[in-house]
Image: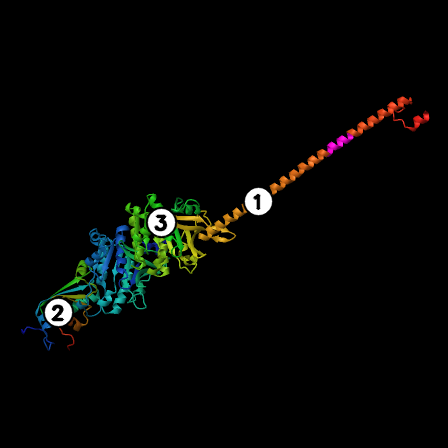
Amino acid sequence: MPASVTITRKKTRPPSPARAAQKKFMLRLYVAGTTPRSAQAILDAQKLCQQHLGGRFKLEVIDIYQRPALARDEQIIAVPTLVRRLPQPLRKLVGDLSNAERVLVGLDLLVRGEN
Amino acid sequence: MKKRGDQRKTNPATLPKAPTGIQGLDDITEGGLPLGRPTLICGCAGSGKTLFAIEFLVRGAMEYNEPGVFMAFEETSEELAQNVASLGFDLKDLAAQKRMIVDFVSIQRSEILETGEYDLEGLFVRLGYAIDSIGAKRVVLDSLETLFSGLSNGAILRAELGRLFHWLKAKGVTAVITAERGDGKLTRHGLEEYVSDCVILLDNRVSNQFATRRVRVVKYRGSRHGTDEYPFLIGERGLSVLPITSVGLTHEAPTDRIPSGVPRLDTMLGGKGYFRGSSILVSGTAGTGKTSLSAHLIDATCRRGERSLVFLFEESPSQLLRNMRSIGLDLDLWMRKGLLLLHAARPTLYGLESHLVTMHKVTDEFKPNVVVMDPVTNLSSGGTVNEAKSLLTRLIDYFKTKQITTFFTSLTAGERSEEATDIGISSLMDTWLLVRDMESNGERNRVLYVLKSRGMAHSNQVREFRLTNRGIDLVDVYVGPGGVLTGTARLAQQAREAADQQACEVAFLTRKRQLDRNCLALSSQIKALHLDLENAQEELKKISAQEQFRTATDAQVRAVMARARYADPLANGAHPTNAHPRKEV
């Protein structure tokens, strides 16, 4: 395993999170307008990514009011939704990202049940 | 204030409605679903919710020029298009014409992880986008409850659903929301709490191993509606609800008549036969000739070049043809000419609803003038008696609107009164003939009478009903002091009467001869007396003449003697006495 893994809270290294962590993350955050909840979600997402992915991520923020067709194509129902497009498989994290641990689990950056 | 008043004027007392276009449903709901409001359709799996919803949209787009959005939570648009293609709905074509949008909402639990608070604005945006892109007036959400399986925060979902329904109302779209039936509740997740304007329940119940679909309007705020459970079918052209009240009893009543095929029966029916488009019921016990009566009607109809359709529930077509041949009716001929169609099906083959569909379908295709159902009583073995009755009611209404004359035979149980057993359907019938057995003197004879026949002066007489090798023959029964007699009893009575008649004649003749002789004797007596009279008169004459002559002679003699004695002439010319002349002398 290369030494460039940035996850520090991990004690064991199960294969999938480890592999996932090495790859570049393509993330999309869908929000609805400029509500406080949207703003908070954007901030939280950026903070988490910075913390846990360093420079290995691309975060795209999409306002579904501006691009409703995209919301349809990406099967967005609830907002905010953070979509992990890469690495596969596709994951949708529904909610305002206030529960950081669940976000990390959802992004395969943290194995469930740890810590 | 002024604005409010205007609004009131534009909102009439009756709720504005969006017609569904689903056959029969708009009759129950008196016009359709509440316009611009959400309607909840609930039902168990397989009860036809999705089909109901899609037909609402398709009819709206095709017939009422109201584009629609279908939000599918369970099926992809391809699956949906395939599923309804069999009903003749081309969703892709409608989508291409921008009259319909199918938006598949995929909620995969495995993909979704909840990380905090959220709302369903995504759904709203998608729905709003779809509605605005084609100017939709109708929306279907099928089925919202999938949200509950995809997202776990019930509190958020509930709040959002409440908001969704308000939003739909604000958008002014007529929405149909489908939901799964729950235990003891209308829907599993209590959606009925949010959709309060109109709730329709679909049901697919199995009784006697037959499944029947039913629809019921549970609630319709601000409108009258039919409250019963109405059977409905998923046929080849979509749903059709068949409410009894659907046909508003407005069918035309033709005045022309069609002969029954039995001339003397026509005579009993005011001389001309049945009314065209009327319903005729023949009830009777087994073997009383009900089918034969129907065969006569078929024969007479086909002879005129009109078409007959027979639904057989008991006999196979070839059996019927053979049996009718034995009474001299060649129905084969009409089959070959394409004027007669025999449609045989066991009542137990499938449920009543399916029978109804089949009968509708066959009738629509064949376009008969006369429809015979033989025997109609067997239908109840495909369901309960009530169901069979409701089916019949709907059938009769249907046939009457098409001015098809219907002829039903009804098998009645021997021990019960014929009139009581058919009481259920008899009120639907215009003409009711009763064929029954009369058992006496060790034989059974059939009699027929007209129990009722609306709109014509019909005979009140009982006729003896005979099946001969030249068809049905109606004979006057013997009605006399000995009661009503049929069969050999009638023949015996007739013979007895003839004998009596003869005896009377003989007695009369004897008596006549006797009296003649008496007369003769009396007149000969009269003759004899006449002769006696003549004798007596002659005698009288004779003795009178003698006396005259004697007197005259006596006077002459005395005159001569007086002259001889020179006696004075008598003063008076009277006879002189012997003394005086002597004295004078």
Disc 3 crowd rating (10 Å Cα; few below 14, some 14-19, many 20+) is some
Q: What is the magenta segment's predominant secondary structure? A: helix
How many callouts does the rendering have? 3
Whether tag 2 and tag 3 are in contact, CB under 8 A, the answer is no
Q: Is residue B115 left or right of residue B500?
A: left
Q: Chain of mark 2?
A: A
B513 or B336, which is in the foreground?
A: B513
Which label sits in the foreground, 2 or 3? 3
Tag 3: amino acid: Ile
Look at the picture and state if B202 lies above or below B492: below
Mark yes or no: residue B14 visible. Answer: no
Bounds of the magenta segment: B536-544
Q: Quadrant of residue B28?
A: bottom left
In the rendered image, which residue does mark 2 sit on?
Answer: A49
x, y percentage for residue B151? 22, 68
Tag 2: amino acid: Cys
Q: Which mark is residue B327?
A: 3
Q: Secondary structure at mark 1?
A: helix
Which label sits in the foreground, 3 or 1? 1
Look at the picture and state if B40 lies above or below B514: below
Q: Earlier in the sequence, mark 3 or mark 1?
A: 3
In the rendered image, which residue does mark 1 sit on?
Answer: B510
Look at the picture and state if B9 lies above or below A62: above
Q: Is residue B520 left or right of residue B348?
A: right
Question: CA–CA distance between discs 3 and 1?
Answer: 49 Å
